[in-house]
Image (spheres, grey):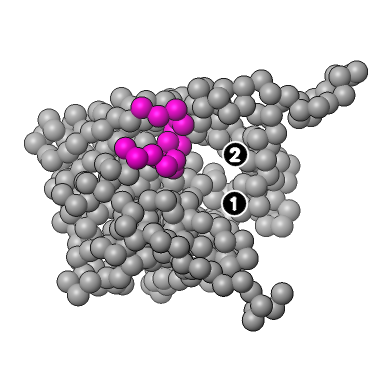
Amino acid sequence: MNDSEQAPYFLEEGEVGFVEYQDFLYPEPFHFVSGGSVPELTLRFETYGHLNAAKDNGILICHALSGDHHCAGVHDIDERKLGWWNFMVGPGKPIDTTRYFVICSNVLGGCQGSTGPGSINPATGKAYQLDFPKLTVQDMVKAQTLLIDSFGIDRLHAVIGGSMGGMQALQWVIDFPDRVGRYIALACGARHTAQAIAFNDTGRQAIISDPAWQKGSYDPDNGPNLGLAVARMMAHITYLSDVGMETKFGRKRRHVDQSKEYFDVEFEVESYLRYQGQSFVSRFDANTYLYLTKALDRFDLHSPDSLDTTLSPVAAQGLVVGFTSDWLYPPQGNREIVEALLRIGKDATYAELAMDFGHDSFLVRAPKLYELIDQFLKR
């Protein structure tokens, strides 16, 4: 089928329709918080809706670890793959694109068009790989401010994100309190628990132990795919809940040869996880996974003094949402953020939703979550 024969994309009610990504280039050196720099910086992003004349209706959406800039609509006419938060963003939806100008960018350190370990260093003509500077959530946010500046936006109506995106939202209102009117942080926390760090490191070791990793200097077409797939499988388990997995898979089996021991796929849940691992390898870079998970592990709002001290610059209205079945970022980790904010006299609200989808609950259609976000943004 040639271009002229492609089926048209029909804009359904509530959909933003066909979208194309753009690349923001910052042509000057970007200096990382922990030291090191890159000679220039690219952030890939998408926008939805229109910036008003006052430039005060901007909303920045920050993605989670395995997410990217494609938040809503479709960017491929053939695949018609919907953005990861398409049900939340669009005309008449909670993040209403008839009201707000929505921006979502792939983070610094990412592998979907933004500058990261797999990007070519213009100074050397080779990929950065492990020469990429030490990365923190602060660096991600600092890079996002340059993108927001390019639109002439002085103050965002809101910053919203879940998981790693929630950490970015919190970092925004700490580092740039005058530039954000309100924020929503979902399924995150002030810092990783020892268990979360342990899961991340086990995933990193799966990648590093893969002979194809080559100490980070692998061929992009022949990288540590086995290690990355295992890392994804293990991480994906932490995104789900026991109830959700039991409901979806239970002990359902596939038809296998029972006459001998069988170490390939026997249970449906095994098939699901292996599929998740293989599909992840096709769209993600192993070194990026190492860098982003380390940045998450280093994120600690209790340091260097105390949580109260770290949160003291916050001026924006806040909504923090925890989910009862989330055992990666348990509700109490979300709740302690709001307790600290209220303790120091800040405007913050905590909501806890009973859902069975684990950490990924913020990525699932839920009327209660719709209403929370819609009402908070309109406050």
* Residue numbers of the magenta segment: 354-368
Instruction: Determine the residue located farthest toward the left in the rendered image.
Output: 345
| Coordinates of residue 192 in the picture (x, y in percent) | 39, 31
Q: Is residue 207 left or right of residue 375?
A: right
User: Helix or strand or loop: what does disc 2 sit on?
Assistant: helix
Circle 1 residues within 10 Å: few <14, some 14–19, many ≥20: some
Assess whether residue 361 is covered by the magenta stretch.
yes
Question: Is residue 163 at least partly visible in the picture?
Answer: no
184, above or below 356, in the image: below
63, above or below 341, in the image: below
Which quarter of the picture shows residue 203? top right
295, above or below 44, in the image: above
139, above or below 296, in the image: below
Going 53% across and 59% down the picture, which residue do you hit?
Answer: 112
Residue occupied by mark 2: 232
Amino acid of disc 2? Arg
Assess whether residue 270 is covered by the magenta stretch.
no
**Mark identifier at residue 284:** 1
Amino acid of disc 1? Phe
User: Helix or strand or loop: what does disc 1 sit on?
Assistant: loop
| Coordinates of residue 127 in the picture (x, y in percent) | 59, 62
**Do the residues under discs 1 and 2 have CB atoms within 8 angstroms?**
yes
Q: Is residue 119 left or right of residue 258?
A: left
| Coordinates of residue 211 in the picture (x, y in percent) | 73, 42
